[in-house]
Amino acid sequence: MSPTPAAPARDRLRIAIQKKGRLADPARALLTACGLSWRESRDKLFCFGESLPVDLLLVRDDDIPGLIADGVCDLGIVGFNELDEQAKARRQIGLPDAYRPLRELGFGECRLMLGIPEEWEWTGVEMLQGKRIATSYPAILTAWLAERGIAADVVELSGSVEIAPRLGTADLIADLVSSGATLRANQLKPVEVLMESTAVLAGPVRELNDSRANLMAMLLRRLDGINATREQKLLMFNAAEDRLPAITALLPASADVVRLPGGADSLRLQAMCGTGLSWQQLEEIERAGASGLMVLAVEKSLA
């Protein structure tokens, strides 16, 4: 029988992630890298944790902050743009904060930007006085305009924001931009960044005080380990003793060089590099006297 959602058990952690969309696959991959595995229900809305008592809810991105606020789930992977929009909307109607970002996750990067018609010449935010701005993020836009003392009409749309100027329902837009191709296709150009966004792990403002707290702490520790090693590379090579100073001068400043046992005619060495190494860097290191270079990805690390 397939598992079905039940009332939240106090000994199981629930994480809400996007069912479909740009954050769905990276979120699952990240949680899998944390050692989690699941059985998926027939309706594909719930995943029962098998390796650990950590379950998944598969939902819409914009439902995740509310699910955390209502206590339906304990954590959520969501775009910071959506989390911040709903947090600002709550504050604007006098509701207290109910969730907060716990970790940036390193994927889902985008920007919320103003887009104006291509024929306009952008001279600054003062141009926005009295204009109609279409957006799916009215709370963020309203707060941004208020901070700058700009009086403009915010036109809230749930989708197809970029066509609003052509339809005559707005003068310009504020929308998420990744490559900018959608703006160009609609004869718009980006001019001002309202906010930078990325996927975040969000949790409640109030700390958990039961066995789920230990599960959350474990998950955060594993995420920190993954984030710490995301760009790390292990460089292994051979070199003569007298070539070592020239080689280490070419390594990233954070590199920690360790001598390995063995090697009759040359030293066997490894260096943990906090950033990636380009082909040009490797070629320069080789010219400085290193041989047998290998660059290995660092999969896991416990801080």
Image (cartoon, helix red, strand yellow):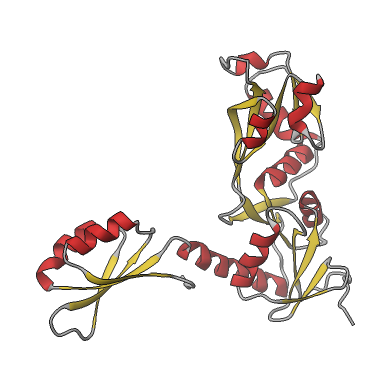
Image height of 79 relative to 175, above or below: below
Residue 258 at x, y percent in the picture: 26, 74
Task: Please report the residue visible at 73 percent of the width from the left and 30 percent of the height from the top.
Answer: 162
Q: Is residue 118 above or below residue 297?
A: above
Kindly identify the residue that appears in the image at 76 percent across and 52 percent down: 61
**Residue at 51%, 68% in the rendered image:** 225
Front position in the image: 172 or 14: 172
Rendered image quadrant of residue 205: bottom right
The mark total stands at 0
Which residue is at the front of the view, 205 or 275?
Answer: 275
Q: Nearer the viewer, residue 33 or 98?
A: 33
The correct choice, above or below, for 133 with respect to 138 in the image is above
Classify the position of the N terminus by image quarter.
Answer: bottom right
Q: Is residue 267 visible?
A: yes
Q: Is residue 81 left or right of residue 70?
A: left
Looking at the picture, how far across and down is residue 129, in whole percent? 69, 14
Residue 272 percent coordinates (x, y): 34, 67
Could you tell me residue 211's position as x and y percent? Answer: 71, 75
Q: Nearer the viewer, residue 217 or 233?
A: 233
Taking the image as shown, residue 286 lies to the left or right of residue 49, namely: left
Q: Quadrant of residue 259?
A: bottom left
Residue 251 in view of the camera = no
For image coordinates 78% across by 35% down, the residue present is 160
Farthest front residue? 185
